[in-house]
Image: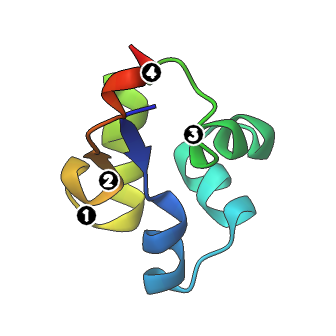
Amino acid sequence: MPICVDIDVMLARRKMSVGELADRVGITPANLAVLKNGRAKAVRFATLAALCEALECQPGDLLRWEAGDPAEG
């Protein structure tokens, strides 16, 4: 997928666990893991805003676009 999620990078920078972030954001650790591992199909702006608030970062610190292989179509 061309959108990459870098939540794990911000977690490491903030020395925060997945469980702690999930508690602060108000989502389950399982749902956070789905997002963190790039398996999510969508993310609500409210969730993204809560992640940014908890991690004290910008949306661009959590999400980035990578060009895909043109053969993948």
x and y percent of residue 29 in the render? 76, 46
Please rate how many residues cluster around mark 4, counting C-alpha atoms within 10 Å: few if below 14, some from 14 to 19, many from 20: few
Viewer-closest of 12 and 51: 12
Observer able to see residue 44: no
**Residue at image mark 2:** 52
Q: Earlier in the sequence, mark 1 or mark 3?
A: 3
Q: At label 4, which amino acid type do we have?
A: Glu
Sooner in the amino-acid sequence: mark 4 or mark 1:
1
CB atoms of marks 2 and 3 within 8 Å: no
Specify the farthest residue to the right: 30
Secondary structure at badge 3 equals loop
Q: CA distance from mark 2 to mark 1?
A: 5 Å
Q: Secondary structure at mark 2?
A: helix
- 13 sits to left or right of 65: right
Residue 26 x, y percent position in the rendering: 61, 40
Task: Identify residue type, mark 3.
Answer: Gly
For mark 1, what is the residue? 57
Can the viewer see residue 68? yes
What residue is disc 4 on?
72
**Of residues 41 and 18, the one drawn nearer to the viewer in this rendering:** 41
Element under label 4? helix
Which residue position is annotated with label 3? Answer: 38
Its colouring scheme is rainbow
State yes or no: discs 2 and 1 in contact (Cβ < 8 Å). yes
Are discs 4 and 1 less than 8 Å apart at CB? no
Q: Secondary structure at mark 1?
A: loop
